[in-house]
Image: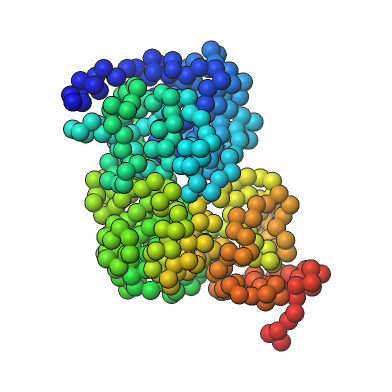
Amino acid sequence: MDYQALYQQKLTTPEQAVKAVKSGDWVDYGWCTNHPVALDKALAARKDELTDVKVRGGVTMWMPEIAKADDAGDHFTWNSWHCSGIDRKIIGKGMGFFAPIRYSELPRYYRDNVSVDVAMLQVTPMDSHGNFSYALAASHLADMLDKAKVIILEVNQNMPWVYGLTGSEINIADVDYVVEGDNPAVAQLGGGGEPTDVDRAVAKLIVEQIPNGACLQLGIGGMPNTVGSMIAQSDLKDLGVHTEMYVDGFVDMALAGKLTGRRKNLDKGRQVYAFAAGTQKLYDYVDRNPAVMAAPVDYTNDVRVLAQLDNFISINNAIDMDLFGQVNAESAGLKHISGTGGQLDFVMGAYLSNGGKSFICMSSTVTGKDGSVKSRIVPTLTPGSIATDPRSCVQYIVTEHGMINLKGLSTWERAEAIISVADPQFREQLIQDAEKMHIWRRSNK
């Protein structure tokens, strides 16, 4: 097959390609760094011709053009699988909504439950075999594109080519249109600034629990990144990676020689992930690097896969938790923040792993805009807050005041343990709350 000839047959302008979108359609923008740029701009220019166009995306890195106009909501509705700050702004504008998911199930949602009229996303340039890489996100894209009635690819020469499992590339034969945009730089995600003393205290407690040869998953945020930095400077060796999101912390560990993956039960020697976002350092590292492997999220996040990886260590953040042990990592009351993502999958999968451990980390307090200090450990979750991890699944909780393991504890033992890692200024009130809730029996007299 003459792939270049086929490419030229399907090459068109963004303005021509987006004519495939009709009023009432479901349009999919893909995921995170793959969201389209030139196609999004061309679709936004058609807004006055269109109504009730429903667009899906997730972990949005920049404001889509279709969401910028004052009357954008009269034409487009944004639907996010996982919220970033940009997604929250779109929702706040009144034209966006969140779709609750367990991220590991997302490919099946497309196979069984979701319709896609037009899919458009950024990819790498085509190789000599007619293939385009999904670059930084394998995620659910293969199943999404299989379901799409029309597929439009936007080629970006700056996208890194990432090797991966089936489900990380698409062939020109399976594409309807190709456009060539302005090759914008890949959107970058910072590491959250310098770690705080609290970040370091929490990270130190966790790193002490990691054995040589462990397989790591890190969530996004300052604390998990601080753990990665500490590991890079530690004496740990022969670590592996099997994670949902690949972040700069893994690159630091790899460049420090900590990631060999030689003790992994699966994908030995490979750093496996569903999607990646970070700085240019990360994008340069993963580009055509055989040490890393992109894979669909129903592989990376499947608890049955995680259970096969010995000494699997999962490290994630939380917004707050209650005295029953329920963890909220998604909302502040009714204000939506992010989503379940893969946190629950990794909490369960780590505990099923031989020698595995799951850590939920957070600072014990949070300071509001008005300067008031509040405890992240509360009697019961604030009405409207989401229980991301049910009390029956949570293992280790870590704050700057210590580490506790909730497995096997009764309600009063849990309350006592949880209060022990709360900020001291709030402990007496939490004890009084626990007494009122009939879950208090002081044993550490």
Q: Is residue 98 visible?
A: yes
Left or right for 55, reference 382? left
Q: Kindly give the residue lying farthest to the right in the view shown.
A: 436
Q: Is residue 348 above or below residue 6?
A: below
Identify the residue shown where x is 39% and y is 46%.
Answer: 296
Q: Image quadrant for the C terminus?
A: bottom right
Quadrant of the rendered image containing residue 38: top left
Asked whether 82 or 251 is in front, the reply is 82
Q: Quarter of the image holding residue 435?
A: bottom right
- Percent x, y of residue 238: 29, 68
| Residue at x-position 23% and y-position 31% | 130
Q: Residue furthest front?
A: 112
In this view, the residue in front, 320 or 386, is: 386
Residue 25 x/y as whole percent: 52, 22
Quarter in which the N terminus is drawn: top left
Provide residue 48's location: percent of width, then percent of height: 55, 13
Q: Position of residue 184 (x, y in %)?
A: 34, 32
Q: Nearer the viewer, residue 372 or 21?
A: 21
Is 346 rendered above or below residue 339? below
Horizontal side, residue 37 vs residue 12: left or right: right
Q: Is residue 401 visible?
A: no
What residue is drawn where x is 56% and y is 50%?
Answer: 340
Image-based side of 388 in relation to 58, left or right: right
